[in-house]
Amino acid sequence: MIKADIKKAIYCSGTLTAKCNIEIKTNNSMNVNGKDYRTIWMEGSSVFMIDQNRLPFEFVIFKSENYLTTCKAITDMTTRGAGAIGAAAGFAMAQALMSKPEKTNDLFIEQAKKDIQKTRPTARNLFYAVELVFEAGKNGAEEAFRMAQQIAEKDIDDSRAIGFYGNDLIEDSSSILTHCNAGWLAFVDYGTALSPIYTACNSGKKVFVWADETRPRSQGARLTAWELYNAGIPHRIVPDSAGAWLMAQKKINLIITGADRIAANGDTANKIGTFEKAVLANYFKIPFYIAAPTSTFDLNCSTGNEIIIEQRNPEEVLYQTGPDEKGIIHRIRVASPGSTAINPAFDVTPASLITGIISEKGIIKADQESIRKVTSKN
Amino acid sequence: MIKADIKKAIYCSGTLTAKCNIEIKTNNSMNVNGKDYRTIWMEGSSVFMIDQNRLPFEFVIFKSENYLTTCKAITDMTTRGAGAIGAAAGFAMAQALMSKPEKTNDLFIEQAKKDIQKTRPTARNLFYAVELVFEAGKNGAEEAFRMAQQIAEKDIDDSRAIGFYGNDLIEDSSSILTHCNAGWLAFVDYGTALSPIYTACNSGKKVFVWADETRPRSQGARLTAWELYNAGIPHRIVPDSAGAWLMAQKKINLIITGADRIAANGDTANKIGTFEKAVLANYFKIPFYIAAPTSTFDLNCSTGNEIIIEQRNPEEVLYQTGPDEKGIIHRIRVASPGSTAINPAFDVTPASLITGIISEKGIIKADQESIRKVTSKN
C-alpha cells in the first residue's frame, strides 16, 4: 500500500480532540525498498499489517479478513508495539461491527468486544481504542470504521508531532543511543523514540544511531536496525552491556527511548534495560529523554511503584531463533541446559533520571505538575 | 582425572615465592557429575583440558600430545581464561622441552617459545609462564616439567586463597551478582570471582547467584551457569540489561567479578559490561568487588586510560551458535541482515567505583598505595 503524499500535510494536534496548528514539512514515514508503508492499515473490511514475527528476515504483509483473525494477529504478535496494537484493536472492533449480519443481535458485538480485549490484557491503548470504536458503532458500522481510521490517524499525528518537537534536541552530527524499538513498527507510522531521528535526518542533519540489541527478544538488533537500514540512517547494533564503554568514549550525545506507561509523577515503565541506560546517562551527564504520546500517561498510577512488571517466559532468554546461512529457521539453546533464567519484560526508570518527555504537545519535564498540565488539556 | 583429596590441604601463599600459612578446610574444587576435575592438567608429556568450545552442551576432555597441538588449543579457545591460558602455555613450553631430541639444537626450543607466545598475544599470564618454564628448562626437561606444574599449582593456591578471603564478605542468605565467567573454567581450579562463593557454600552459608548472560559470547549463560549447576548452587541467568531492575528490587547484596588487567591506580579492565554493573552498584549503594590474583596487576599501566580495549569480530554479536532440540548445532543470524555491530571485548571500571580487590594476599583497596604495597611483597 502506497500512502498519499504527506510532504505538505498539516499536523493536527489530537485529531480526536483538538485543532490543527503545526505544519510538518518533511516526509519521514516508513520506507521499505523505496515504497511507503504503514505498520497496519484497513481497506474495506480487511486489515493489513507488516508481519513482525517474520522481520527482519522476511518482509511480508499479513491480511486479515475478519475480527477473529485480527485478534489472533495481536495475540501472536504478528503486530506489536503500543500504537500498532491500539490501531489493530480499533480495526478489529470495526471489522466485527461491519460484519454484523442484519439479524444478529448485540450479543455478537459484545462477544467480539470481549474477544478483542482478551488478546493482550495489559496493553492500555487496546482498551481505549476498542471502547471508542464500540461507542461509535452505535451510530452504525460506517461510523465505527471512521473512528478506527481516526484512531490510526491520531497515532500517526502524535508520532509526527513527537518527531517535530524532538528534532529540536538533536544537533547536527549527533550520535544517539536508543533501546528496544519505538519506531515505525511499534506505531502506525513514524514511531516515538525514532521519530525525532527521522525528522532530523530529513531536515538534513547528520545523525548516527546506536541501537541497543535489547535482549532477550532483540527488538533493537532485529527491528530498530531493520528500520534504520531501510531509512538509510548510519547505525550500529550495540550489545546491551557496552553502553558504559560507549559513553566513556564520549560516543553518545543523547539518549531517547519510548515508554509503555508513565506514572503521574513521571516514573516511566519501558523495555527492560531502559533504567540501566538512565543510570549511566546520569553518571556520564548525557541527556536522557523519553518519547511518548500523552496517551501513555497513566494518572491512576501515582508513582512507578504501582506499575506491575510483567514476567515473561524464561525460554526467551534460553533460546534464540533465526535463519542459518541457507535461510532455514532454527530454534537453538544458547544457555547451559541445567539452568533457567529470569525475564522481566520492563523496568521503571525514576523520574529523577529523566531529562524530559517528548510528547505530541511539546517537551515537558518528568514531574507531576508538568504531566498534570499537559494531560488536563486532553 | 580424579584429583587427590584436598579437604585438609595446606594453602601455600605463593608456592613460587612464599611460605604456607593458611589452612583451607573445605573442598570446593570443580566437580562434574560427582567427579573432581581441573580445567587443565599434565600427565607425562600429555596435556589434558576440558574442551570449553563444546561446553555447556558436551563435556569432553581434549588430550594434546605435543606443544603445537597445545598451542592450537589456546588459539582456538579450547581452553580460555587468564589462569587456564597461563597454565596451558607453561605446559606447552614443558612439552617442547621434553620432546627435544638429544641432538636438536636450541633453535627448536626458541621456535617453540615463539610459537607459544603467538597464540594469544595479549594474555599476560601466558608470557610470564612461558618465560619461567623456558628458564627452568636450562636445567633440563625435568625441571621445566616441575616448573610448569608449579605454575598450575600456584594458580590453584591463589584462587583458593581468594575464596578464603572473599568468603568474609559473604553473609548467610546472600544474593550475589557476577558477570562473565571467572570460575573453575577460567583458571586451573576454583576461579576468582566464584571462588568466594564456592567457599561460602562449602562452609554452610546459603548463597544465591545471579549470573549475567554476558553477551555476545554468553560466558555467564554458558559457563558460569554450567559451573553453578554442577556445584549445586542455586542460580538464575540474568539478561545483561536486567541488573538495575534486580538491584531496585533489593535482590542483590554483593557484586563480584574477575579482572583481565588492573592498572597501578586500581582501574580494572574486565569483560564488557563490568563497568555498567559498577555504575549501577554505585547508584544503588551495593558493594562491588573485583577478585583477581596479584599477577593481574600491571604496574606498567599507570591508569586505565593506557589499557587498549580489544575490538572483536562483530559476527559474535550478529550470530549465535547452539543445538536445536535434536542436539544438532546450528549457527543462526540473530540481527537484521543489513546491519552490523560493535563488539568491544572489555571495558575499564574506574577505581573510584570499586569497593575492594580480593587478592590471594587479602582484600585491598583499589588505589595506588594499596596496590604498591601488595605487589612489592611479590
Image (cartoon, coloured by chain):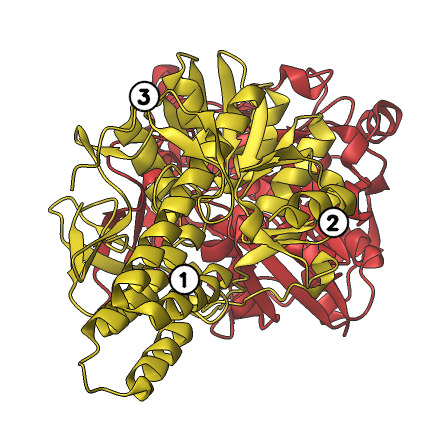
Chain colours: A red, B yellow
Distance between mark 2 and mark 3 Cα atoms? 43 Å
Q: Chain of mark 2?
A: A
* Residue matched to label 2: A162
The amino acid at mark 1 is: Glu
Q: Residues within 10 Å of mark 3 (few under 14, many from 20)?
A: few
Q: Amino acid at mark 3?
A: Thr
Image check: B169 left or right of B112? right
Mark 1–mark 3 distance (CA, rounded to whole Å): 58 Å
The quarter of the picture where the C terminus of chain A appears is top right
Residue B43 in picture, x, y percent from top left: 18, 53
| A361 relative to B200, above or below | below
**Residue A104: mark:** 3
**Marks 2/1: CA distance?**
35 Å
Disc number for residue B316: 1
Q: Please say whether residue A301 is visible from this viewpoint.
A: yes
Inspect the image, locate mark 2, and give the three-letter code of the amino acid beneath it: Ile
